[in-house]
Image (cartoon, rainbow, N blue to C red):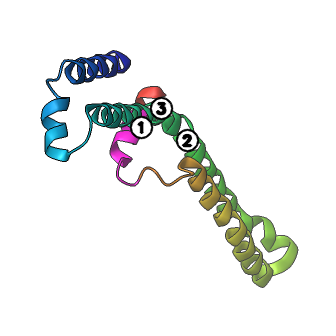
Amino acid sequence: MHNAVLEWLSNLFDTSVGDGRLGVSVSRLQGTSPIALQMALQNKLVELRSTYASIPDQLSGRMPLAYVQLVQILTDLLIFCTPFALVHSVGGFGAVLGTSVVTLFHSSIVSLAKLFLDPFSNEAPLLAATAAALMNDE
């Protein structure tokens, strides 16, 4: 559908520059040729097409939200169970020290999983729209 609109705009610009409706008045004001105006308009249309064509690529490059939630739940469960597993083998102080080391390493895994959710940091202004799109996809 979007390609049809851009094709319509391209034909409209070509026709209006070709019969002098657009190019003559603008070229008089700017002191350029109508062909330069036509090329500038076509370049802007190509830029618009490339911009809207990259939107699905950016959305498909994202990690599913359920993956990040699963990693968070599993990490929290592991950190919760670590002191109970360590207290019998290394004692109270060893359990606290071991739990802090496990927490340090596994919190970095959770941070990495959150980075995989949005690897290029594109979603700061589009967070609500992205969450809605993710909910509709799942």
Q: Earlier in the sequence, mark 2 or mark 3?
A: 3
Residue at x-position 55% and y-position 41%: 62
Q: Specify the quadrant of the image occupied by residue 133.
A: top left
How much space separates mark 1 and mark 2, taking CA atoms?
Answer: 18 Å
> Where does the magenta region start and end?
124-134
Query: Observer-nearest residue: 8 or 86?
Result: 8
- Magenta: main secondary structure equals helix
In the displayed structure, does residue 114 sit left or right of residue 124? right
Q: Specify the quadrant of the image occupied by residue 44.
A: top left
- Residue corresponding to mark 1: 51
User: Callout 3, which amino acid?
Assistant: Pro
Please state the horizontal and vertical placement of residue 104, each as a whole percent of the image. Answer: 68, 72
Q: Of all residues shown, which one is farthest toward the right?
A: 89
In the displayed structure, does residue 78 sit left or right of residue 15? right
User: Callout 1, which amino acid?
Assistant: Thr
- Residue corresponding to mark 2: 62
- Residue corresponding to mark 3: 56
How much space separates mark 2 and mark 3, taking CA atoms?
Answer: 10 Å
Please state the horizontal and vertical placement of residue 69, each as a whole percent of the image. Answer: 55, 47
Residue at x-position 27% and y-position 36%: 33
